[in-house]
Image (cartoon, coloured by chain):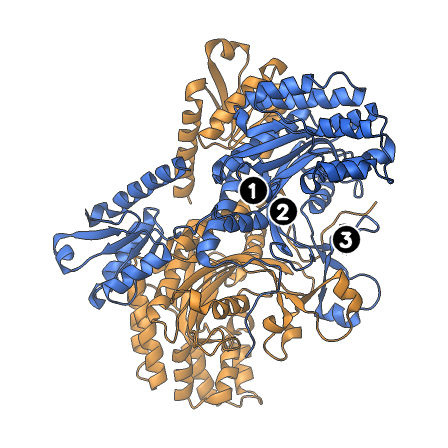
Chain colours: A orange, B blue
Amino acid sequence: MIKPRTPPGVMELLPRDQIAFQRMLDTIRLTFERFGFLPVETPVMELSEVLLTKSGGETERQVYFVQSTGALEKSGEGLPELALRFDLTVPLARYVAEHEHELAFPFRRYQMQRVYRGERAQRGRFREFYQCDIDVIGKDALSIRHDAEIPAVIGAVFEALAIGDFTIQLNHRKLLRGYFEGLGIEGERQAAVLREIDKLDKRGQEAVAATLEGEGFGLAAETVAKLMAFSQVRSRGHEDALAKLAALGPGSVLFEEGRDELREVLQRLKAMGVAESRYAVNLSIARGLDYYTGMVYETTLDAHPQIGSICSGGRYDNLASHYTKSKLPGVGISIGLTRLFWQLREAGIVATAESSVDALVTLLDDADLDHALALSQQLRAAGLNVETQLEPRKLAKQLQYADRAGIRFVVIRGGDEAARGVVAVKDLRRGEQFEAAEADLARTLLVEREQWRAVGSSSN
Amino acid sequence: MIKPRTPPGVMELLPRDQIAFQRMLDTIRLTFERFGFLPVETPVMELSEVLLTKSGGETERQVYFVQSTGALEKSGEGLPELALRFDLTVPLARYVAEHEHELAFPFRRYQMQRVYRGERAQRGRFREFYQCDIDVIGKDALSIRHDAEIPAVIGAVFEALAIGDFTIQLNHRKLLRGYFEGLGIEGERQAAVLREIDKLDKRGQEAVAATLEGEGFGLAAETVAKLMAFSQVRSRGHEDALAKLAALGPGSVLFEEGRDELREVLQRLKAMGVAESRYAVNLSIARGLDYYTGMVYETTLDAHPQIGSICSGGRYDNLASHYTKSKLPGVGISIGLTRLFWQLREAGIVATAESSVDALVTLLDDADLDHALALSQQLRAAGLNVETQLEPRKLAKQLQYADRAGIRFVVIRGGDEAARGVVAVKDLRRGEQFEAAEADLARTLLVEREQWRAVGSSSN
């Protein structure tokens, strides 16, 4: 006998939690599709040579390699031929370069699949997790207007997920770099300072200031003070965002480019009707990766700042330089849904879902089975998810089962009801019972379900 | 520069094909949920020790092993710790045994995920492919009534997929084994004969008969003739199925058990209103695996028998004997969707889908951008999937783009329309153009879309 268990670092859910998770996935996908993003799925394994284009750094990424039984026996030299993807960006680059002449640009794709990282086993760290990504890829050029649509998508996703108030934090790498230039911080040092600024949330102002004044950087106290003041800038509301940007005063060409683009993003967000409480300029957002070159985004839950950013991304200059000579600038974001779901459960923000099963058709007398089967099919044809009790049990047992499973409606047809052509329905959610003519049952339950959904979504 | 390419044996789709594939996945899932099946997802990698419980046979299954960079360096002894799942049945067994005390039985689950097999690279053979499975798992016992519901689910799935007329072939292992007993074929030889019968479709009657009369089996010509006649039995329609079963005459206890259960399945299918053209008794269906012990199912497309079974499964005695002492009988089926999709495309049965994007809001004049953004959001809020043209281009270019992308509605607002508060809509599907007041646009498009869906589904 072998002990049944999953490997460490994966999230496996019981059905009611899986239903809650699936609803989040569905909501995100629906919203991505609302904005005209197209679905892409890529294989979980890529050729190692293609996946690991950058020399070095692979071990940091803790890549998982894949070998079939045969290859395992022959192994020994070099890396295995196959590896599991560690994000959805490298596969996107490979996909766009491979299918460049079959795609229309700007290419808007969403991808929601699992990725793999050999992380150190630790609570809340996952080796297999979902990423839900959107990217817009241009050919040669891509208008800043796409960067403006991205936060509108983020806003729509988190409105629809209804997990609480949130703020999309906006910044621009050119604004940051232009400001650094003005302080005389150039070249390599710029990237290093950016990485320190990115740690402000985790390390706090004092620690970061100390590092910047310390040996490695050796910045003047006055310069560091300016950097700290700059990175403290946060806006509240649309007009305040514009005012805060204006108050920064004039800067370098790079600085002005960044400010102009950030202003355009703000303007378009307003045109799209995104509530101004949902976005803010935050000049401390740097996104450590060297990858980003323009707009950068982070999203936080107002009541749970400790969770950190739940959706991040930005603009990059060239997606696929390893695979094609074409210049492919892009802008995109990613939601790490496995970790987010885990955090939301830890924080008590997502509760156990009602079942995906709408109704249980009970069975009290074995002779009624064929009738119960036919009635169930009638409800299914109308669009309801139905489980049929296939063997008679005590009604109390069947009710208890439905209650534990989170099934809302229990349909009961005893001798008395049968004689009158009606069924009794127990609504376990409301704790009510009512009768319906059999012919009307599907319509009645559908109306109840829709009302409940309407109530459910407006109360969030 | 590295050539961007996928490993051999995987299916990667361009967006319009991905949309068609996604619609099939959605349809299958919706139907599984209609019948009250609950979602389960398991990690793609399992502990090798847990996954590969059966000694031997692993190499046949061509398992992929997984190693992180660190493990790779230390490797050498024994099998790697992790392996990719090669089906969804072993993970289900592990899941049910692991969560036995948290699940309600009978446990009805669906799982639609990718599985991995190191198949020989060959056209139409995949190393990564989707399986869409349902299973019902009982504790200690499971009523035959669940076996009767399974073909109703298969029927509903393929009605909804609308890929042509199909037949669910039904048989029962006890009927087969009971008949063999009557011919004096017992024990080990029974399983061997079953495997030969299972090859009838591929090898043909003569070849299989020759094998059975040959040295290995040495069955009498008369016995083989009876086996061939028996396996030729096919029913057409419900009454014919019952008549064919009756015409088999009396048999062993095992035989009668099988026949009784098959009869009950037929009765319940009728009660559920499954069209009798959709199911048939076929006594040649054996399902080679020793695994199955009762009902067995295969499904074929009437116009494309060469595709073979597109949905198969059956009853098994004990799901998880490697992981638990509990007896867990079950019944289930599997659809190999990647291969099915590939075959349907090869056979010209699935065409390129219309886009998931319902409408393109065009942009003719840069000054109208904010208006186009607001109009797009209005349509999205009503439930339409909308892409906004963010930079002005010639209308002909925008129409061409929409046409190639398979977007149905193109919304145009020139100076004339703007002055009158209307927009022009080109319906690329119907080749028609009409005007709508801006305030009514969302409603108009939604009505058009619903009508089209109604037409689309009734014409299949």
In this view, the residue in front, A39 or A69, is A69
Q: CA distance from mark 2 to mark 3?
A: 31 Å
- Between disc 3 and disc 1, the foreground one is 3
Which of the chains bears the disc numbered 3?
Answer: B
- Picture mark count: 3
Identity, as a three-letter code, of the amino acid under mark 3: Glu
Q: Which residue has dot 2 on it?
A: A13
Residue B80 at x, y percent in the picture: 77, 62
Q: Secondary structure at mark 1?
A: loop
Give me the disc on residue A305.
none
Question: Does residue A394 appear in the picture of this structure?
Answer: no
Cβ atoms under marks 3 and 1 closer than 8 Å: no
B249, above or below A102, in the image: above
Q: Which mark is residue B60?
A: 3
Amino acid, disc 1: Thr
Q: Secondary structure under badge 3?
A: helix
Q: Is residue A428 left or right of residue B308?
A: left
Q: Mark on residue A352?
A: 1
